[in-house]
Image (cartoon, grey):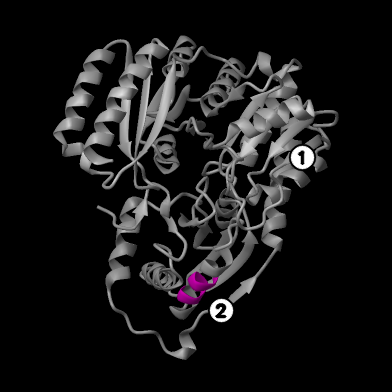
Amino acid sequence: MKRYFGTDGIRGVANEQLTPDFVLRLGRAIARYLQQQLPVPRILIGRDTRRSGAMLETALISGLCAQGAQVTSAGVLPTPAIAYLVREGHYDLGIALSASHNPAQDNGIKLIGGDGYKFPDDAELAIEALLEEPCPYPPAAAIGQWHYDEREREQYLLYLLHLMREWTGQREPLQGIHIAVDCANGAASLYAPTLLTELGAKVSLFACEPDGDNINAGCGSTHLEFLQQAVLQSGAELGVAFDGDADRALFCDENADPVDGDSIMTLWALHRHAQGTLNPPVVVATEMSNLGMERRLQQEGIQLVRTRVGDRYVAEAMCQHGALIGGEQSGHIIFREVATTGDGLITLLQTLTLYLQGERPFSEIAHPFEPFPQRLMSLPVRDKHAWQGHPIVQAAIQETQAQLNGRGRLNIRASGTENAIRLMVEAETTELVDECLQRLAHAIRTALG
C-alpha cells in the first residue's frame, strides 16, 4: 500500500504534511527514479495559485536539480496544460503543484509521464521506496539547471484557440454568446478570460482574482451555488465553474440548473453516436456516475464501462477499450482525441461547440437523461481504512445493500485525498436514498468518527 501517494498524487497541508524538507527529498527521489532510464531527465513544473505554491516549487526544483535533473518552470498553469506540454514538448516528466478543489492551506504534487498520462501506481510505489533510502548528493559538476519559460503558457492557450477554431471553422465562433465564468480564484483565472474573449464571447467573470488564499473559497466546481447565483445575476446563457487547477468543469444552464459531468458526457456521446463517429460506442465513467446515465446510453446502444474513482483509472480504461470519451460526474472529462487527462477548458470548448450546433437554449440540450436520486456525503474519520473490517459499519452496509437490491446502489470508499470516507447512495426515491444514507452515516460516526 502506498504511504504518500493517493488517487491523485500526494496531497496534504502545506508546512504540515507537505514541508519544504519533504518536498526537497521527494524531488531527489523523483529524479533518481527517472535516472534509472534517463541520465539527465527533463522536467516541466507548473502550479496553481495557492500561497504555498512558490515555496514548495522552489523546494521541489532544488531537490530535482541537486540530483541532476534539468527543470523548466512555467509558473501558474492548469494541470491539463502540463500534460499537453509534456507530451508535445521535450520533457520526460510533468509535475503539477496543486491540491485541485481542496482549500488554500492544502497543496499537492501530481506526476505526469512523458506520454501525458498520470504516473501509474507501481511508479509511485517505486518513488516512495527511493524516498526512504539514504542517498549521498552527487558532485557539484552533476547539478542540474533550472529556468523559467512563460512561453509554455502561451503555447497551451494557442492550442485551445486552434481547437475551437478548427471545430467550428470560425475565428470568433462565440460572437454574441454570453457566458458566466467562475474561475475558483485558481489557475483558470489566467486563461479562461483571454480564451473566451479571443473567441468572441461576452464574459461575466466571477472568482477571478487569486490572492493565494481565496482559491476554491466558497466558489468553483465544489460550490456550484456561487455559479448559479452568478448566472442569474448576469443573465448569461450558460455558466461554467472550474476547480483550482482547472482540470474539471461543471455547468449551469440559463435557468441556473446544474449540469454535471455525467450530463456532459452523455450529451457528447449521443451527439457523436448520431453522427456515426462514436467508434467504438463506449463511454467510460466511474462507479459514482448516475444509473440514469447508464440507462440512457444503453437505450442508444452505447456501452458504459465503469472504473474506480480517479481520472487515472478512467484514462487507463479508455485506452483499454478504445473509448473516445470518459470521465467523472465531478467534471473531470477526458476527450481522448485531443487530451490525455481531464481538462476543464477543453470540456468548456466541447460543450460550447454542442451548444452552438443546437441553436436553442442550453437548458433544452443539457439534461439528456432523467437522473436517479443520488446523494454524496464525505465523513471525516480517524482512520479512513478501518471501515472495511469494522463490524458495526459492515452490518450497516449489508443491511443497506439488501434494502437497495434491484432498487438502487451503494458506493463506499476511502478518500484518496483526505482522511475521510466517501458515501454515495442512489435509489428509485429520495426517501430511500435518505434512509440508507442516514443509517450508514450513523454507523460510521459511531464506529470511526
Q: Secondary structure at mark 2?
A: loop
Q: Toward the viewer: 411 or 440?
A: 440
- Whether 369 is drawn above or below 134: the answer is above
**The C terminus - image quarter:** top left
Residue 399 left/right relative to 75:
left
Q: Nearer the viewer, mark 2 or mark 1?
A: 1
Q: List the single residue furthest toward the front.
A: 446
- Whether 60 is drawn above or below 144: the answer is above
Task: Please tell me how crowded label 2 is: few (under 14), some (14-19), or many (20+) other residues with Cα within 10 Å.
Answer: some
- Labelled disc at residue 196: 1
- Magenta stretch: dominant secondary structure: helix
Q: Secondary structure at mark 1?
A: helix
Q: How many marks?
A: 2
Where is residue 122 drawn, in percent x and y?
31, 54
Residue drawn at x 80%, y 32% is 174
Between the C-alphas of marks 2 and 1, the distance is 36 Å
Where is residue 235 drawn, in percent x and y?
78, 25
Where is residue 58 drawn, in percent x and y?
54, 72
Task: Please tell me how crowded label 1 is: few (under 14), some (14-19), or many (20+) other residues with Cα within 10 Å.
Answer: many
- Labelled disc at residue 2: none
Whichever of labels 2 and 1 marks the residue nearer the N terminus, that label is: 2
* Circle 1: residue type: Leu
Residue 20 left/right relative to 448:
right
- Labelled disc at residue 145: 2
Q: Magenta part of the protein: which range?
A: 58-63
Where is residue 54 drawn, in percent x and y?
58, 67
- Whether 301 is drawn above or below 327: the answer is above
Residue drawn at x 47%, y 18% is 293
Q: Toward the viewer: 69 or 447?
A: 447
* Circle 2: residue type: Gln
Residue 405 counted in the magenta span: no
Residue drawn at x 53%, y 74% is 70
